[in-house]
């Protein structure tokens, strides 16, 4: 049976997902409660769902143009702590999730240099060799909906086109985007006015898309990830629109967090990745896999799916953002293709 969440919980989580720097005073106005109540509700949410505050960044603007998703199948099932040890110092992986089903790992790798990525990927089978590894890499072009949290270490190592102060500021925000202006200015040893200007510039330039959060203990029992391949034809675009409208319309089902959390086209071993939150496996199969197959029947979709069971590295890309107003459909222009 679906859990019912309070208006205050939903309102506070939605507000902080959209802007994690929303003040307690603003939350009291939105949630129609006292400052004490808003603070208690916020602390309860942080504790119950393991909320981490970070940023959604424009990776292209930071020069992080090498973004890859690797679906990994293993012959021998590893323990979570073993994988944590293997990847703890890996410089190219932002987020890694342990799964059970058609595949065993989802690896999100980011860098600015194509050659260094190629070398890293070529060495990956050796890292996982004890487990009997099969790796299916794809390039992550963008996300239609959702995001992958950017790591402090990735900004430090690979971000380009920013000075040292902006780099340090972005690293601090990646760790805690709700930090006060006083704490940020003190850490950076700059005035509050300078800090305001730098934050304004980073937002205006689009480098920071959103101050946001990640929910690492989602309130729903089944996290489904699915990777899809298609055989497209001339009429596939019409069904793509139907699928997009389905995702948008489904957003109202859960009052605390939207069902579909990440929807991303890819190029490579797979063409699409989806991650969603469901009540159980039956709910996930019915409302994600079977719907996808029914809409794309003519494309004969090959769908590999698995339940995400833990975080090896990074954080989950889960938050409360309205799909209808944030879903973007990417289109290549002929000029873009010529330039590439």
Image (cartoon, rainbow, N blue to C red):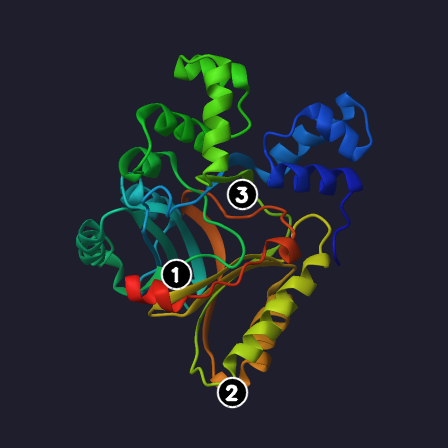
Q: Earlier in the sequence, mark 2 or mark 3?
A: 3
Q: Secondary structure at mark 1?
A: loop
Q: Earlier in the sequence, mark 3 or mark 1?
A: 1
Residue in the image at 69% along x and 25% along y: 24
Q: Look at discs 2 and 3 and give the one toward the viewer.
A: 2
The label number, if any, that marks residue 298 in the structure image? 2
Picture coordinates of residue 155 (x, y %)? 34, 36
Residue sitting nearer the eye, 294 or 159: 159
Query: Disc 3 and disc 1: Cα gap in Å?
Result: 19 Å
Picture coordinates of residue 333 (x, y %)? 41, 66
Query: Disc 2 and disc 3: Cα gap in Å?
Result: 37 Å
Q: Secondary structure at mark 3?
A: loop
Residue 68 visible at all = yes
Picture coordinates of residue 82 (x, y %)? 32, 46
Task: Give above or below for 183 relative to 146.
Answer: above
Which residue does the numbered mark 1 point to in the structure image? 104
Task: Give above or below for 268 relative to 200.
Answer: below
Q: Look at discs 1 and 2 and give the one toward the viewer.
A: 2
Residue in the image at 22% along x and 53% along y: 114
Q: Earlier in the sequence, mark 1 or mark 2?
A: 1
CA neighbours of label 1 inside 10 A, class few (<14), some (14 to 19), many (20+):
many
CA neighbours of label 3 inside 10 A, class few (<14), some (14 to 19), many (20+):
many
Picture coordinates of residue 9 (x, y %)? 73, 39
Residue 71 visible at all = no
Q: Look at discs 3 and 1 and give the one toward the viewer.
A: 3
Which residue does the numbered mark 3 point to in the structure image? 216
Task: Give above or below for 232 relative to 256.
Answer: below
């Amino acid at each position: 049976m679906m859990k019912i969440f309070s208006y205050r919980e939903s309102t506070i989580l939605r507000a902080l997902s959209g802007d994690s720097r929303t003040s307690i005073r603003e939350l009291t106005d939105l949630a129609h409660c006292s400052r004490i109540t808003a603070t208690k509700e916020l602390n309860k949410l942080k504790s119950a769902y393991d909320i981490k505050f970070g940023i959604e960044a424009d990776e292209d603007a930071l020069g992080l143009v090498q973004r890859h998703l690797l679906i990994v199948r293993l012959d021998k099932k590893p323990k979570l702590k073993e994988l944590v040890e293997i990847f703890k110092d890996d410089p190219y992986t932002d987020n890694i999730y342990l799964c059970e089903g058609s595949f065993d790992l989802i690896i999100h790798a980011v860098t600015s240099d194509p050659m260094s990525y190629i070398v890293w990927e070529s060495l990956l089978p050796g890292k996982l060799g004890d487990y009997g590894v099969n790796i299916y890499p794809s390039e992550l072009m963008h996300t239609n909906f959702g995001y992958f949290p950017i790591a402090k270490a990735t900004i430090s190592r690979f971000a380009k086109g920013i000075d040292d102060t902006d780099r340090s500021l972005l690293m601090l925000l990646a760790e805690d985007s709700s930090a006060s202006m006083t704490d940020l200015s003190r850490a950076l040893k700059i005035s509050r006015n300078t800090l305001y200007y730098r934050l304004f510039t980073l937002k205006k330039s689009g480098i920071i898309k959103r101050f946001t959060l990640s929910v690492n203990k989602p309130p729903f029992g089944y996290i489904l990830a699915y990777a899809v391949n298609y055989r497209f034809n001339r009429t596939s675009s019409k069904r793509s629109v139907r699928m997009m409208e389905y995702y948008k319309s489904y957003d109202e089902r859960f009052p605390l967090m939207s069902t579909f959390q990440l929807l991303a086209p890819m190029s490579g071993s797979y063409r699409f990745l989806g991650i969603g939150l469901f009540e159980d496996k039956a709910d996930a199969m019915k409302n994600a896999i079977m719907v996808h197959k029914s809409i794309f029947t003519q494309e004969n979709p090959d769908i590999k799916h698995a339940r995400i069971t833990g975080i090896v590295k990074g954080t989950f890309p889960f938050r409360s953002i309205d799909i209808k107003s944030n879903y973007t459909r990417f289109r290549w222009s002929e000029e873009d293709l010529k330039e590439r």
